[in-house]
Structures are given as structure tokens and as C-alpha cells.
Amino acid sequence: MKAGAAALPRVAMVGVGGVGGYFGGRMAQAGHCHLHFIGRGATLTALRERGLRVDSINGDFRYVSSIS
């Protein structure tokens, strides 16, 4: 990284339900931070296999990355 360049903050989204998934997905989509989703059980399995999919009146999107 170049001297003086600002590093992006690292954010962990713990609990990837309806609210955490939506707002975490929007944060990741904006690209202003390095976002990591933390889930468990069936949610974690689904996120690893298919990624995060958000269906919204504000625009649908899919996010696949940094899911643990």
C-alpha cells in the first residue's frame, strides 16, 4: 500500500439473518469496507453454497465472498 493511502476498515457482520444480511450486503455492495459475514448452522451452509442474495424494492443483488 502506498504511503498516505487510507486503508479500508474491516467489518464483521455477526448474525446473517434478515437484518444483518440486508445491511451487511448493502455495506459490501458499496465497497467502503472489507466485510466478513459470520454465520452458523443451516444459514452458514446456505451462504457458503449459494452466497447472499437480497431481494429488495431498492434493487436485488447477490454477494459471494468472505463467509465463515
Image: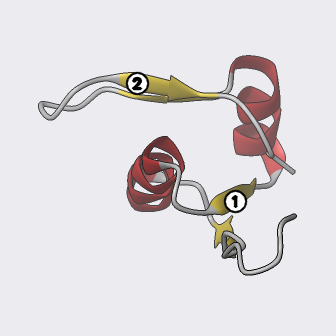
Disc 1: which residue: 34
Name which residue lies at 39% across and 59% down. Answer: 19
Name which residue lies at 80% across and 45% down. Answer: 67
Name which residue lies at 83% across and 67% down. Answer: 2
- Extreme-left residue of the structure: 57
Secondary structure of the residue carrying tag 1 is strand
Residue 38 spot, x, y in % from top left = 76, 60
Residue 23 spot, x, y in % from top left = 40, 58
Tell me if 35 is positioned left or right of 21 in this view.
right
Tell me if 63 is positioned left or right of 61 in this view.
right
Tell me if 5 is positioned left or right of 29 in this view.
right
Q: Which mark is residue 43?
A: none
Circle nearer the N terminus (2, 1): 1
Nearest-to-viewer mark from 2 and 1: 1
Q: How many marks?
A: 2
Count residues near mark 2 (Cα–Cα under 10 Å), then give few for <14, some for 14-19, many for 20+. few
Q: Nearer the viewer, residue 36 or 33?
A: 33
Name which residue lies at 30% across and 23% down. Answer: 60
Is residue 49 placed above or below 67 in the rendered structure? Answer: above
**The residue under label 2 is which amino acid type?**
Phe
Residue 16 spot, x, y in % from top left = 59, 55
Disc 2: which residue: 61
Is residue 54 placed above or below 8 in the rendered structure? Answer: above
Tell me if 43 is positioned left or right of 52 in this view.
right
Secondary structure of the residue carrying tag 2 is strand
Q: Quadrant of the N terminus?
A: bottom right
